[in-house]
């Protein structure tokens, strides 16, 4: 069966427990979605809850984001955002996890999302994530029970960046990844940093999106 489907995963949180507005980080979705579409993938969105997810970080002066928000097909796909279990996992060739602070709350604890990721990994698919979206990988396990991130070279939004922005989530992503045996690395705060380890591609922060997206354009459907 051809793996022609690319899935962009978005946090479903509209508000944090503190009441602060949440949502997926729109640049993460825009850059990766358009890159995958240009490479010939059929792109869909999934989230921890059905329906249109909230969004943050919108900058309409950015032509990539403007193109994303101005595409009727993409807007329709966001309105039809589904749960991960609704997908035919055998058709998924790429999973991309977008960031946004809410991702620290809902992505790691979603069992169906972790199972889908494990299935894609075991089937030879690609996984990419940026910023807090890397949190989705914390509970993904290999068939032998080992953490997917163990001994993997990767990056994610750094603890230093969280401190600068005053982010207080339910977990410290950098610390959690290291605790699972990941080989974490980072650049200076808010500077680009992308790490590829086999079929895993991670970006530290939004500044990393152009390079991460260029890598995605090279992925071929199988």
Image (spheres, rainbow, N blue to C red):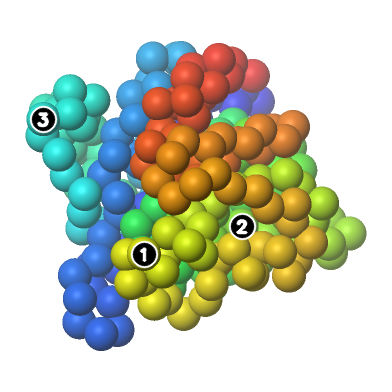
Mark 2 vs mark 3, foreground winner is 3
Q: Which mark is residue 164?
A: 1
- Who is closer to the viewer here, 26 or 74? 26
Q: Around disc 2, counting alpha carbons within 10 Å, would you say few (fewer than 14), some (14 to 19), or many (20 or more)?
A: many
Q: Residue furthest front?
A: 188
Residue visible at 21% across and 49% down?
57
- First-in-chain label (2 vs 3): 3
Q: Quadrant of residue 68?
A: top left
Q: Is residue 24 left or right of residue 40?
A: left
Q: Is residue 6 left or right of residue 165?
A: right
Tell me residue 130's x, y (percent). Answer: 47, 45
Query: Mark 3 sits on what residue?
Result: 61
SS of the residue at dot 3?
loop
Q: Is residue 47 left or right of residue 172?
A: left
Q: Residue furthest right?
A: 144
Query: Mark 2 sits on what residue?
Result: 137
Distance from disc 3 to disc 1, alpha carbons, whole Å, reads 25 Å
- Who is closer to the viewer here, 31 or 153? 153
Tell me residue 53's x, y (percent). Answer: 24, 56
């Amino acid at each position: 069966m051809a793996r022609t489907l690319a899935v962009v995963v978005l946090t479903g949180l509209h508000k944090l427990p503190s009441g602060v507005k949440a949502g997926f980080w729109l640049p993460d979705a825009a850059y990766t979605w358009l890159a995958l579409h240009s490479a010939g993938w059929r792109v869909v969105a999934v989230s921890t809850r059905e329906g249109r997810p909230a969004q943050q970080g919108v900058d309409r002066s950015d032509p990539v984001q403007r193109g994303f928000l101005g595409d009727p097909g993409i807007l329709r796909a966001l309105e039809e955002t589904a749960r991960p279990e609704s997908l035919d996992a055998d058709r998924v060739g790429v999973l991309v996890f977008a960031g946004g602070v809410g991702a620290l709350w809902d992505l790691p604890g979603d069992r169906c999302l972790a199972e889908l990721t494990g299935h894609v990994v075991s089937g030879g698919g690609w996984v990419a994530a940026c910023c807090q979206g890397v949190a989705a990988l914390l509970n993904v396990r290999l068939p032998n029970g080992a953490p997917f991130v163990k001994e993997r070279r990767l990056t994610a939004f750094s603890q230093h960046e969280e401190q600068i922005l005053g982010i207080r989530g339910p977990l410290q992503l950098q610390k959690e990844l290291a605790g699972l045996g990941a080989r974490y690395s980072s650049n200076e705060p808010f500077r680009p940093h992308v790490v590829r380890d086999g079929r895993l591609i991670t970006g530290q922060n939004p500044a990393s999106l152009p390079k991460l997206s260029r890598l995605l354009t090279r992925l071929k459907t199988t």
